[in-house]
Image (cartoon, rainbow, N blue to C red):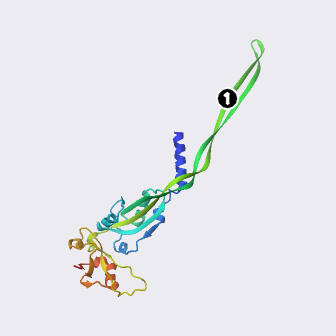
C-alpha cells in the first residue's frame, strides 16, 4: 500500500509540473463574431454533449441539426482531459463541444519525482554486569549487534518526454428551430472602407433539418436573390435580416 501511494505522489508531481492541470480551453477561448448567440439566448436542455469531429462536413451536420457556434479554442499542448472542455462549455452556455486532437511532436520538459533514500547504521557493543545473588557477588559479560535503517524522501528534477497535441474545440448551443425560418447565410465580410450599398453575392451557408427553409427546398450553397420579397443585392439589403433572423418568412434563391 505504501509503495502504491508513493507512485501516486510521483505521478501527481509529474502532471502538476507538466501543466496538465491548466484549463487551456478557457485560456484560449475566442467568442464567435456572429450575433446569433444574442438572437437565440441560452436554453439549456441537459448535460453538455461532447463529440470528436475530424471533418468540415461533420461540423456542418451539427449546424444543420440546429446548433449555432458560440466560440472556439485552439492550442498546442500535452493531452488535456476532455472534462476541461465540458467545464468551459458550461461557462459559456454551450450544449455541445466538438473536439479534434492531433499528435504534433514530442518535447523534453523538466519535471519532479520524489525518490526514497535509505541510510543503514550498524550498532555493536559489549555489556559487563555485576550483582549480588544467592551465592554472593557475581559478574556477567555479553555482546550485542544490529542495524538501524532510516528512510528519507528527496525531490529530484528530471527530464521527461512529453507528447504535444494540436487541440481544437468548437462550442455550440442548441436553438429552438421552430422560432426562425431555418437558413443561415454566407455573406462576404465587409471591409471598413467599403460602402454599405456595394453589390455582393449572398449564399446559403446552412439549412436546419426539418425547418421551414428545408421543407421549402432551400439547400446549402444556393445564391440568395430575395428575402420576404426584398431583393438581396447589397450589404444594406441583407443587414436587417442578419440582425433579426426570426423576421424571415421566405427566401428566394437563384434557379
- Identify the residue at image location x=64%, y=35%: 149
Q: Is residue 170 above or below residue 130?
A: below
Res 101 quadrant in image: bottom left
Circle 1 Cα neighbour tier, 10 Å, few/some/many (<14 / 14–19 / ≥20): few
Answer with left or right where residue 30 lies relative to residue 107. left
Looking at this view, is 37 or 114 the one in front? 114
Residue occupied by mark 1: 146
User: At which x and y percent is residue 22?
Assistant: 50, 59
Q: Is residue 30 visible?
A: yes
User: At which x and y percent is residue 230?
Assistant: 26, 85
Residue that protrudes farthest toward the top in the picture: 135
User: At which x and y percent is residue 20?
Assistant: 50, 56
- Identify the residue at image location x=51%, y=54%: 162
Looking at this view, is 94 or 103 the one in front? 103
Q: Is residue 23 visible?
A: no
User: At which x and y percent is residue 126?
Assistant: 74, 25
Q: Is residue 55 above or below residue 157?
A: below
Q: Name the quarter where the C terminus is drawn.
A: bottom left
Answer with left or right where residue 115 lies relative to residue 170. right
Res 74 quadrant in image: bottom left
Answer with left or right where residue 57 lies relative to residue 20. left
Q: Secondary structure at mark 1?
A: strand
- Identify the residue at image location x=31%, y=79%: 202
Residue that protrudes farthest toward the front in the picture: 105
Number of numbered labels in the structure image: 1
Answer with left or right where residue 139 lies relative to residue 198. right
Amino acid at each position: 500500500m505504501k509503495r502504491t501511494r508513493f507512485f501516486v505522489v510521483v505521478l501527481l508531481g509529474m502532471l502538476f509540473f507538466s501543466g496538465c492541470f491548466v484549463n487551456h480551453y478557457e485560456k484560449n477561448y475566442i467568442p464567435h463574431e456572429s450575433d446569433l448567440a444574442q438572437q437565440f439566448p441560452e436554453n439549456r436542455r441537459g448535460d453538455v454533449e461532447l463529440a470528436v469531429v475530424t471533418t468540415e462536413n461533420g461540423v456542418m451536420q451539427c449546424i444543420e441539426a440546429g446548433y449555432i457556434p458560440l466560440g472556439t479554442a485552439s492550442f498546442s499542448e500535452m493531452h488535456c482531459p476532455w472534462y476541461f472542455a465540458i467545464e468551459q462549455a458550461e461557462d459559456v452556455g454551450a450544449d455541445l463541444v466538438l473536439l479534434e486532437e492531433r499528435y504534433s511532436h514530442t518535447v523534453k520538459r523538466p519535471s519532479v519525482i520524489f525518490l526514497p533514500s535509505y541510510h543503514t547504521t550498524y550498532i555493536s557493543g559489549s555489556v559487563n554486569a555485576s550483582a549480588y545473588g544467592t551465592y554472593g557477588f557475581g559478574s556477567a559479560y555479553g555482546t550485542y549487534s544490529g542495524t538501524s535503517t532510516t528512510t528519507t524522501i528527496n525531490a529530484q528534477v528530471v527530464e521527461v518526454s512529453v507528447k504535444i497535441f494540436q487541440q481544437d474545440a468548437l462550442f455550440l448551443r442548441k436553438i429552438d428551430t421552430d422560432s426562425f425560418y431555418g437558413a443561415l447565410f454566407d455573406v462576404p465580410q465587409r471591409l471598413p472602407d467599403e460602402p454599405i450599398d456595394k453589390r455582393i453575392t449572398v449564399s446559403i451557408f446552412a439549412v436546419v433539418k426539418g425547418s421551414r427553409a428545408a421543407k421549402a427546398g432551400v439547400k446549402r450553397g444556393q445564391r440568395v436573390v430575395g428575402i420576404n420579397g426584398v431583393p438581396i443585392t447589397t450589404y444594406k439589403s441583407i443587414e436587417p435580416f442578419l440582425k433579426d433572423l426570426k423576421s424571415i418568412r421566405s427566401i428566394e434563391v437563384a434557379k
